[in-house]
Each structure stands twice: as structure tokens, then as C-alpha cells.
Image (cartoon, rainbow, N blue to C red):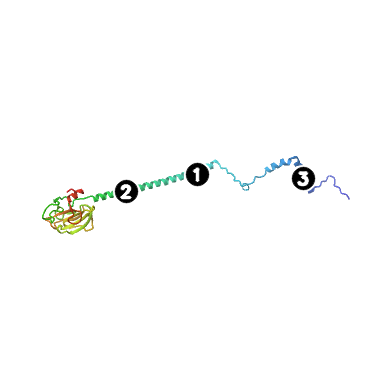
Amino acid sequence: MAFTRATGKHRRPSRMQRTTARAASVAALTATGVVGTLAAPALAAQVEPAPETTGLTPVITIGDSIADQIDAQAAAQEQAAADEAARKAAEEAARERAAEAAKEAHEAKERAARAAERKRLNTFVAPISGSYVSTGYQSSSSLWSSGSHTGIDFHAASGTAVHAVGTGTVVTTGWGGAYGNQVVIKMHDGTYTQYGHLSSINVSVGQSVTPGQQIALSGNTGNTTGPHLHFEARTGPEYGSDMDPVAYLRSHGVHV
């Protein structure tokens, strides 16, 4: 029994028919070059790959105002660094000036102290203020065992202040035989001075004395004909090492 399609009725093409038709269409377009012209725009329309998939670093463009702000900030930082460096340099220079000034002041102080010490050591005074020499050096007389005067005598009433003629150290005090009560001082230059016929003594052995310091009171002790001060200049501490006391005092600026 035969079947026929009704007139005016259409059935949907089968899958095989649709595939066959598409294949035929593509073949026809390829033959005419249409596929080539259509493929390029289609490929160009595809989305470009992301930078992370290509390994390329994207370039970021910033506006001029932001760049100016960055430059201004960098300039401000540089200026601040320069100002800080200048401040530190100024502080260091100030410290150096202060240290130099302190050093100069210290040196000046030391020079002044040395000058004062030299002046003190080189200052000499008369053993009796406002007095005069009543008996000269090496005067001859039977009063002295050596036959001549080993020192000089200063006129002075008993109880008159007797002064150290210069800077030194006391080496002898007490009774000295014909000299009565005496004081012997080793001077700073290694010479010795002796003060005799004292009524009282105000210093002790080992004591340092300064020019003009009172060391005793004049008197009339020992071998004497009346109160006065016997003064000697010596090269050593003992009797017999005497030298001219007037020349000695004058060499140190004391005029008697």
C-alpha cells in the first residue's frame, strides 16, 4: 500500500538533512572567498587577553596635577633634609667654638696662674718693715767669734714683727746659741735665710711661708748688746755658709 504526502504540507528536515545543507553552504562560500572576508572581522572582534595572561606590565598614566604634587613633596623632603643637615652643622660648629673658647680660657687661666706663681716666687721683702741696717756685713768686732759679722743687723725694738723675705720652707726653729732664738728658712731657689735674737717664734719646722708672712718677733736673746734682728743669707742651712745679705736682697729687688 503506497502513502503519499498531502499537497501543501511540509515536514521539518531531518538532522542529516540540516547538516548536509550547512556543509554544502560552507563549501560554496569557501569557493567564492566569502569565508575569508568574514573570518577576519570576526576574529578582530574578540576580547584582547588580560595582561596577567600575557606577562606584559600595563602602563599607568597619571595627571599633571598629581605629578606636580609628588614633585613638590619630594622637593619639600629634600629641603627638610638640607635644613636638618645645616642645623646639625651649625650645632657642631657651635660646639667646636665653645670647646675652643673653653680651651683658650683654660690656657689663659693656666698662664695667669703660672705668672702669679712666678711673681710670688720672685717677690722678696725686707725682714723688718721701715727699718735700716745698723751693722753691716763682715764688720770687724771682738763681739763675734769669727772676728767679723756674718750677717747684717736691722734696727728693731723688741716685739717688732719679723717677716719671711720670700717663699720657702722652715728648716730650723728654736735656740741657736749665740744667735739666741732663731728661724732658718730654705728659699725656693735653694738658698737659705736666717733670723736671730728673736723674742718669740710663730712658725714650725716644715711649714711653708710666703713673702711678708710674719714668722717671729724681734728681741734681745743670745749674744747681743741690745734688741735688733740679725739677718743672714746663706748657701746652706748652717753657720759658715754666709754670703752678702745686702747683695742678696738687692738681687731680688729689695733695696736696703
User: Residue 39: x and y, percent?
Assistant: 71, 42
Q: CA distance from mark 2 to mark 3?
A: 115 Å
Given residues 1 and 176, the one toward you in this image is 176
Q: Is residue 141 left or right of residue 12?
A: left
User: Residue 27: x and y, percent?
Assistant: 76, 43
Q: Residues within 10 Å of mark 2 (few under 14, many from 20)?
A: few
Mark sitting on residue 74: 1
Callout 3: SS: helix
Q: Of the residues under marks 2 and 3, which one precedes in the sequence?
A: 3
Q: CA distance from mark 2 to mark 1?
A: 49 Å
**Residue on which disc 2 sits:** 107
Which one is closest to the eye, mark 2 or mark 1?
Answer: 2
Which one is closest to the eye, mark 2 or mark 3?
Answer: 2
What residue lies at 47% left-to-right and 44% top-to-bottom? 78
Q: Residues within 10 Å of mark 1 (few under 14, many from 20)?
A: few
**Residue on which disc 3 sits:** 23
Q: CA distance from mark 3 to mark 1?
A: 69 Å
Q: Is residue 90 above or below residue 215?
A: above
Q: Residues within 10 Å of mark 3 (few under 14, many from 20)?
A: few
Q: Is residue 25 above or below residue 224?
A: above
Callout 2: SS: helix
Q: Residue furthest right?
A: 1
Q: Amino acid at mark 1?
A: Ala
Q: Is residue 170 above or below residue 73?
A: below
Given residues 117 and 70, the one toward you in this image is 117
Q: Amino acid at mark 3?
A: Ala
User: Residue 173: x and y, percent?
Assistant: 19, 58
